[in-house]
Image (tube, rainbow, N blue to C red):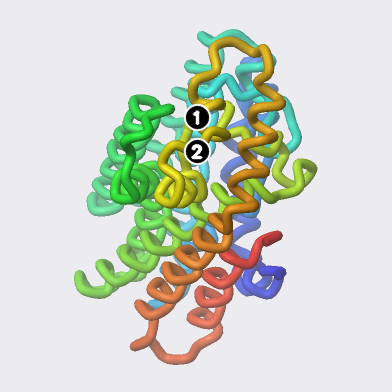
Amino acid sequence: MSIASTVDLVAAEMAQVEARLAGVASVEYPLLGELLKHLLDTRGKRLRPLVLILSARLFREASPAVVDAAAAIELLHTATLVHDDLVDRSTVRRGRPTLNSLKSGGVTVLVGDYMFAQAAGLAAATRNPDVVSVFARSLRVICEGELRQIDTRGDWRQSLDDYYYKIGCKTAALFAAAAEIGAILGRASKSERQRLHDFGYDLGLAFQIVDDLLDFVGDERELGKPVGSDLRQGTLTLPVLHLLRSDPESPAIRAVVDLDGDDGRDEAIEAAVDTVVASGAIQSAHSEAVERVGLAKSRLDDYPPTPIRAALLELADYVTARRF
């Protein structure tokens, strides 16, 4: 499924976002500029800026503040990935070397911090206290989610509620912030702000669920990382939790969790991935993602059938249709 028509609808605003991001990488210090360019060129679909811009345009035409906020959200997202890759010791993201695989941990942390500062500056440039408040809140929540994920690695006692809480913090919170900030800058009412926040939150949950199942059945060339990466890090995602509900002592999963060192790791990961796929857990997880997307789309039921509303609905459908 393509979202080309959605992107075309806000092409002018997205081009301005790219210009803002390029400006962030235009610094006098060559090393910093080179590293920022490497990170910002390793681009995805820019879904979060898209959500923000479309949410704003659901209510009125986009202002320069909308572009600033959209660039801020993308920078915040990228900065969190920089720190995540360092924590996870990941070497590849989107098919390119991670910053921590190229430079020291200290350099990686500082570049991530620099991006956080630039993101905060762009959020402040909107001159809207509510935008800054939502931006700060989302960063706090993301940090909590990442800490919880680290703290629960390899923990068999995790429940589905634990999983949803973590992905709500580490992923859905930023989608929710993007949609809510768009509504704020579109001068929406408080109830409409909440509705768009909820739309973004449900969309973010679905996005992370699909990301987690693609870690088992995706194409490594498209994922930009090895299949089974979550298991390698001891992160038990929704497909694994579904398997453990039916087989709490799964030998394949236990073998991965109990591994000490790299001996036999690749074989254990491959066996665990095969076990999860054969169990039907992927289909169960995907059904939950589809359900979340349906809930997200229902948040927009009361809005007129405009091209912008249709674009938000298309974006929601794309989340569960990507390469599955």
What residue sits 43% from the left and 27% below the top? Answer: 154
Quadrant for residue 42, please give it: top right
Nearer to us in this view, 258 or 9: 258
What residue sits 49% from the left and 54% below the top? Answer: 209
Q: What residue is shown with label 2?
A: 250
Where in the figure is residue 263, as x and y percent of width and height?
67, 12
Asked if residue 53 is positioned above or below residue 174 in the image, the reply reads below
Which element is circle 2 on? Answer: loop
Where in the figure is residue 252, as x and y percent of width and height?
57, 34
Quadrant containing the N terminus in the rendered view: bottom right
Name which residue type carries label 2. Answer: Ser
Q: Is residue 180 visible?
A: yes
What residue sits 58% from the left and 51% below the top? Answer: 213
Residue 254 - label: 1
Nearer to us in this view, 90 or 299: 90
Tag 2 near tag 1, CB within 8 Å: yes
Asked if residue 4 is positioned above or below residue 97 in the image, the reply reads below
Left or right of 256 on screen, residue 154: left
Q: Is residue 135 visible?
A: no
Asked if residue 60 is positioned above or below residue 277 in the image, the reply reads below
Quadrant containing the C terminus in the rendered view: bottom right
Which element is circle 1 on? Answer: helix
